Image (cartoon, helix red, strand yellow):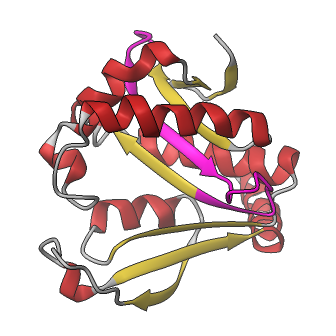
Amino acid sequence: MKVFLETDRLVLRRFTEADADDLVLLDSDPEVMRFLTGEPTPRAEIEEEVLPRILRDYDLGPAGRWAALERSTGQFAGWLALQPPEDGSVEEVELGYRLKTSVWGRGYATEGARALIRKGFAELGVQRVWAQTMAVNTASRRVLEKAGLRHVRTFHLHFDDPLPGTEHGEVEYELLRPDWTSQGTRNRVADSRN
């Protein structure tokens, strides 16, 4: 098992071909897919496109998508990512997460996102972390805000078969390296006062 990082409650490790069933199960939950595609991802797509792409990204550079396991049980909880662009560079990476509904509300997305952001800026040379979601996806927006990202724009895309809530647009959040550095300084000063 190639561990990328560990938090208090999560282990983030590289995916393997043996993880196809977990990805299919994750993407078959209507609540998980509600703000993404609105429908399950077919097994063939996961086995022939999604998982091979995840595995190829590991060869491009240090960023990518990792299986998130609960430390206490070793059970698959979902995935978290610092997704690089097609060329594998890490200057700008997209923060992403998809967790099983059985672990929602436990703070795993925020915990994992903060750890990935810290590793990205402190060790990988990341300069900008960004993320997008539907404007109506308030739970995901809260995770982004708790992870230190700030809202930078709301925009509208055209979809032939829009999901409910699409009319409210998409939102983009970001965190730049200098802002992350100053957040860390503020947090260390606040901690020293307590």
Instruction: Point out residue 81 in the picture as x, y percentages from the top left corner.
Output: 57, 45
For the residue pair 25 and 109, the one nearer the viewer reads as 25
Q: Quadrant of residue 170?
A: bottom left
Instruction: Point out residue 40 in the picture as x, y percentages from the top left corner.
Output: 19, 43
Q: Is residue 56 magenta?
A: no
67 lies above or below 74: below
Q: Residue at x 45, y 39 (%)?
A: 50
Residue range in magenta is 72-94
Q: Residue at x 24, y 75 (%)?
A: 136
Q: Residue at x 38, y 22 (%)?
A: 20
Q: Is residue 88 magenta?
A: yes
117 lies above or below 42: below
Horizontal side of residue 144 vs 93, given as left or right: left
Q: Quadrant of residue 185?
A: bottom right
Asked whether the viewer can see residue 192, the reply is no
Instruction: Point out residue 176 in the picture as x, y percentages from the top left corner.
Output: 74, 72
Q: Quadrant of residue 105?
A: top left
Instruction: Point out residue 75 in the picture as x, y percentages from the top left corner.
Output: 38, 14
